[in-house]
Image: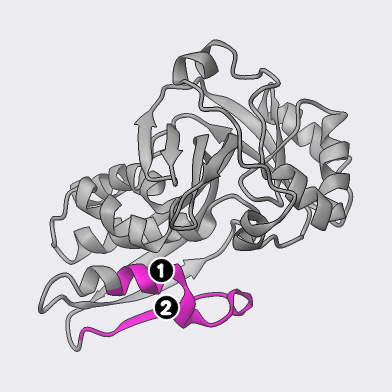
Amino acid sequence: MTLLAPAKLNLFLHVLGRRADGYHELESVFRSISLYDVITFERVTRGGEITLSAPAHLGNEQDNLILRAARLLQNTSAGTPGANIRLEKNIPVGAGLGGGSSDAAAALIGLNALWGLDYDLQALRAMGAQLGADVPFFVEGQDAWVSGIGEVLEPINLPETHYFVVFPNVLVPTAQIFRDPHLTRDTQPSKIARFLELPAGPSWKNDLESAVLAGYPEVGKLKNWLSRRGTAKMSGSGSACFVEVESKEAGEALGEDLPEAWQGFVVSAGGIDPLQRQVKKFSDQ
């Protein structure tokens, strides 16, 4: 079974406060986009071993969220088979695009089907929350208003569109940004209806930007460059930034002027197949 694990964009990201357990209360809108890691799963019937083939630049494979997700799922049921897993990595690491979380969700959903475990999405979301705050979104797979620490999801219907996404080849560690003294944690809660009424309004900002720009000047250069071409925003904890564009062709035109040190992606949003729908299509073949 081969699954396409999509990246996501945060159309805004508000930090409402810090909880007693150290986590942060957030509000955001997540959109899946057509930038994918490609993950292939092969069932192993003997021994229960799980192996992962992944690019060397990702570091120690034992720390990879795919393996952690697979082992978490395997440990829920006695006698679960093993798997050989192969990862083709296309989503940049440390970009705020959720690649690792999407990969973990793909492992949960793909192996749940391949191993015949029959967990429903609610159970898989709960497992995903043990791995990372963004994983439940990718398990669900629909564009969503996100709150809590990232685990409370309310699906929303947004129009199909295109974005030009740029990665400045800078890796930003999420945990470091949430500890940064530049980070404000006092944005007031809002409502879905207000966002849907004026989604491009100036109040919908990324509260992590000030901390990222203070520590990573290359992200500031990128934001300034994109801001001359549209309403530029940073996704998640950075370092990728994006602008909405009228069409694929308009995004490709922006890419022609992109500095060589950066990577640009023209992506679509809306109509992205959730992972569970991909599994169903595979099962129906």
Q: Residue furthest bottom?
A: 47
Q: Which residues are magenta?
A: 48-71
Residue at horizontal 33%, vertical 42%? 140
Asked if one can make out residue 93 in the rendered structure from this viewpoint, the answer is no
Q: Residue furthest front?
A: 20
Where's residue 1, x and y in %? Answer: 31, 61
Neighbour tally class for label 2: few under 14, some 14-19, many 20 plus, Cα within 10 Å? some
Q: CA distance from mark 2 to mark 1?
A: 8 Å
When asked about the image quadrant of residue 206, the answer is top right
Look at mark 1 in the image and give the residue it sits on: 66
Q: Say if the magenta span includes residue 39.
A: no
Helix, strand or loop for disc 2? strand
Marking on residue 52: 2
Residue at horizontal 70%, vertical 26%? 245
Where's residue 236, x and y in %? Answer: 61, 46
Q: Select label 2 or label 1 by which is in front.
A: 1
